[in-house]
Amino acid sequence: MSDSARNSATISPTAHYTAQVWLRNGLSDERLSTPQGNALWHLLAPAMAVSRWVGGPTLEDFLLARHELIDLRLTDAIEAGRVSQVIEIAAGLSPRGLRITRKYGDRVTYIEADLQGMATHKRQLLGATPLNHRVTTVNALADHGPDSLAELVKTLDPSRGVAIVTEGLLNYFGRDDVLGMWDRFAHALAGFPHGLYLADIHTNSANHGPMTDAFLLLLSIFVRSRVHIHVGTSQDVAAALHDCGFITATVLNPADFGDRLDACGRTWAKLVQVIEATSSSGGRAGGARLAAQTEPALPSR
């Protein structure tokens, strides 16, 4: 199956398992717990325990680090008054929308967006939600049409800042699809007084060595798809984001936040990094092709 043809059924094992990790660490809601997630967590628990015992990585190490660091940077932007509208794309069973709307109430409009199957499933799990928290259908690979991000942002208040969040999405797509998403995100955010993009990413520079390679192979088997490791360094990621139209782009190392977030203090939190990019009105640059490790860093389109 091509990257572009992925659907909600393909990513559901990841969504179910991750939801259980969040729940078991006090970050989620019982409504988002599923029998599949509970079964997967118990199935993988012995292997994760062995890996931890020998000093190796576990899924929880980077799942919690990325989630808590994205939360921190998002809430910092909300409390600073820069953002009051959030779109979480490929939200899956993420509990972030529940937590943000409970904490900030009507100060924040939160939209969870996913492919139709997952969006329908989540609406069924959540039941009624406040007017400022809704679940809708969006295809992150669509340039136009009713399920595109371009149509969704037309429903937002153009006088208020917007954040786009993706978690657990980028590394299941090849570089062309990722660059296409970054182009769409930068373009969508450019129409607002402040635009913020937050996402996790795994890079070659942070994921190397036999233990990490074996772990990523097992992860690919678990999610039933290849896990893509993008570009060589965080500088390459930032450069590609600039070329896709973002005004500023930084790649954050969770280890730098270990004094504020317990999950980021774990040894293997370093497997993941978090993108923080901003965009404002006033146009956008053409995108550049994201480089594979064996290709020039940023070949032009």
Image: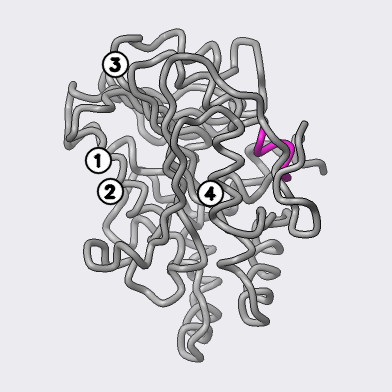
- Nearer-N-terminus badge (1/3): 1
Residue mark closest to the camera, 4 vs 3 = 3
Task: Residue under label 2, please give it.
Answer: 72
Q: Secondary structure at mark 2?
A: helix
Residue 150 location, quadrant: top right
Q: Secondary structure at mark 3?
A: loop
Which of the numbered marks, if any, corresponds to residue 168? 4
Q: Nearer the viewer, residue 95 or 85?
A: 85
Measured in 3D between alpha carbons, the distance from the residue under mark 4 to the one under mark 3, in whole angstroms, is: 26 Å
Q: Secondary structure at mark 4?
A: loop
The residue range painted magenta reads 174-179
Measured in 3D between alpha carbons, the distance from the residue under mark 4 to the one under mark 1, in whole angstroms, is: 19 Å
Residue at x 40%, y 50% (from the top left corner): 33
Instruction: Tell me if mark 4 has few (under 14), some (14-19) or many (20+) residues whose alpha carbon lies within 10 angstroms of its own.
Output: many
Res 224 seen here:
yes
Describe residue 99's horizontal placement relative to residue 20 as left or right.
left
Describe residue 28's horizontal placement relative to residue 2 as left or right.
left
Mark 1 vs 3: CB contact within 8 A? no
Which of the numbered marks, if any, corresponds to residue 160? 3
